[in-house]
Amino acid sequence: MFGLEGLGVPAGFALTLLSALLCIWYGVKNWNRGHLSDDEARRKQAWAREEQKVEENL
């Protein structure tokens, strides 16, 4: 039917569609994750300043 003989081709189509839906769901779920909080941003800036001081002293 529709040139989809055997089990491999329909399974490939189904898995392709399923993986696309899974990728979309994951992207929507984690859309704005990973941003630093204010406290984390301050600590990161302080670490960068300290790292720069250490490199200047070398």
Image (cartoon, helix red, strand yellow):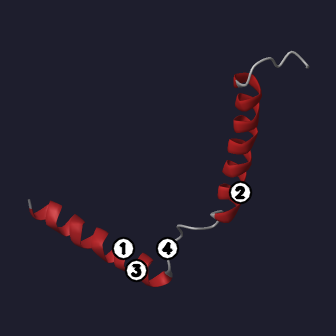
Question: Does 25 sit above or below residue 43?
Answer: above
In x, y percent, where is residue 42? 40, 80
In x, y percent, where is residue 51? 22, 66
Q: Secondary structure at mark 1?
A: helix
* Circle nearer the viewer, 4 or 3: 4
Q: According to the image, label 4 marks what residue?
A: 36
Mark 1 or 2, nearer chain start: 2
Residue type at mark 2: give it.
Answer: Trp
27 sits to left or right of 46? right
Q: According to the image, label 2 marks what residue?
A: 25
In x, y percent, where is residue 41? 43, 76
* Residues at discs 3 and 1 in contact (Cβ within 8 Å): yes
Residue type at mark 4: give it.
Answer: Leu
Question: Does 34 sit above or below residue 43?
Answer: above
Question: Does 52 sit above or below residue 19?
Answer: below
Q: Secondary structure at mark 2?
A: helix
Question: Does 32 sit above or below residue 40?
Answer: above
Q: CA distance from mark 4 to mark 3?
A: 9 Å
Quarter of the image for residue 16 reads: top right
Q: CA distance from mark 4 to mark 1?
A: 12 Å
Q: CA distance from mark 1 to mark 2?
A: 33 Å
Which label number is shown at residue 45?
1
Q: Secondary structure at mark 3?
A: helix
Q: Residue at x 72, y 51 (%)?
A: 24
